[in-house]
Amino acid sequence: MSAIDVLRGLLVGKNQLGAKRLDAYWESVRPEVSWYPSAGACYRDVLFWNWARVAKNLTQGPSIFIHTDYNYKGCAVSKELFQPDKHTRVQILAVHHLGFKDTALRYGINPAYAVFPESALGRPAADLLDIRLTSDALGIVTSSVLYFYWENINFLQEVVLARKLPITHLFKLREGCGLGGATVNRFPWPMVF
């Protein structure tokens, strides 16, 4: 199954407007997926993959952008925010709340992986965000992001592996572990692609 088939079988709009927007989204994307674990309020992956497509003259790149972060309070969607580089502005144009068709999902927050488990939701949640990024260097990019408010390991187990969601690209800039300040063995995670 393609990524679109897997995600289409998993997600549903919570209201009529969300369902209509989700249907239009499925028709507008290709099955290449970029996953950004512990994304927080960072959307630089969308800029990066757009830049890579243009700069490297690639005919394809990710069309579906998936972000995960369990810390719902830490990545709460605001209408406008600046990225840490201070040269990129993100505008949230629309938020469509999504539900899950699959009631067999085992959602949970493991305190061994979560610094702030109290900031997690008690149930699985996801949004389809329509965003506009304005970068001093790269111009204006509009895109959509599927944001899953899940802990990364739980998302990997329950969605990527159990439902065989093919991930073609991985973007890792933030580590999370206490609001992005952690490193692994004193070496920060690089962007992986």
Image (cartoon, rainbow, N blue to C red):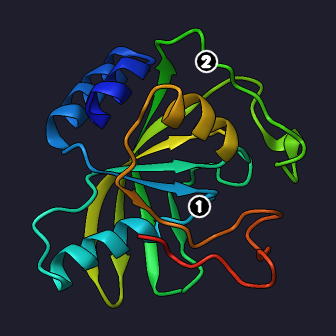
Asked which quadrant contains residue 177, the reply is bottom right
Q: Earlier in the sequence, mark 2 or mark 1?
A: 1
Q: Which of these two is toward me, 111 or 88?
A: 111
Q: Is residue 112 left or right of residue 156?
A: right
Which residue lies most toward the bottom here?
137
Residue tagged by mark 1?
41
Above or below: residue 167 compared with residue 48? above
Give the residue displayed 77% in from the left and 65% down from the top. 179
Q: Amino acid at mark 2?
A: Leu
Q: Residues within 10 Å of mark 1 (few under 14, many from 20)?
A: some
Give the residue displayed 50% in from the left and 75% down from the top. 191
Instruction: Please tell me the numbered disc located at residue 26.
Output: none
Q: Amino acid at mark 1?
A: Ala
Above or below: residue 6 compared with residue 110? above
Give the residue displayed 30% in from the left and 29% down from the top. 22
Asked which quadrant contains residue 131, the reply is bottom left
Q: Is residue 105 left or right of residue 60?
A: right
Asked which quadrant contains residue 170, the reply is bottom left
Q: What is the CA distance from the residue labelled 2 to the residue labelled 1? A: 25 Å
Where does the image place residue 74, in percent across and percent down from the top left? 72, 54
* Quarter of the figure that contains the N terminus: top left
Residue tagged by mark 2?
105
Where does the image place residue 110, in percent across and percent down from the top left? 84, 38
Above or below: residue 5 compared with residue 154? above
Q: Secondary structure at mark 1?
A: loop
Above or below: residue 170 compared with residue 126? below
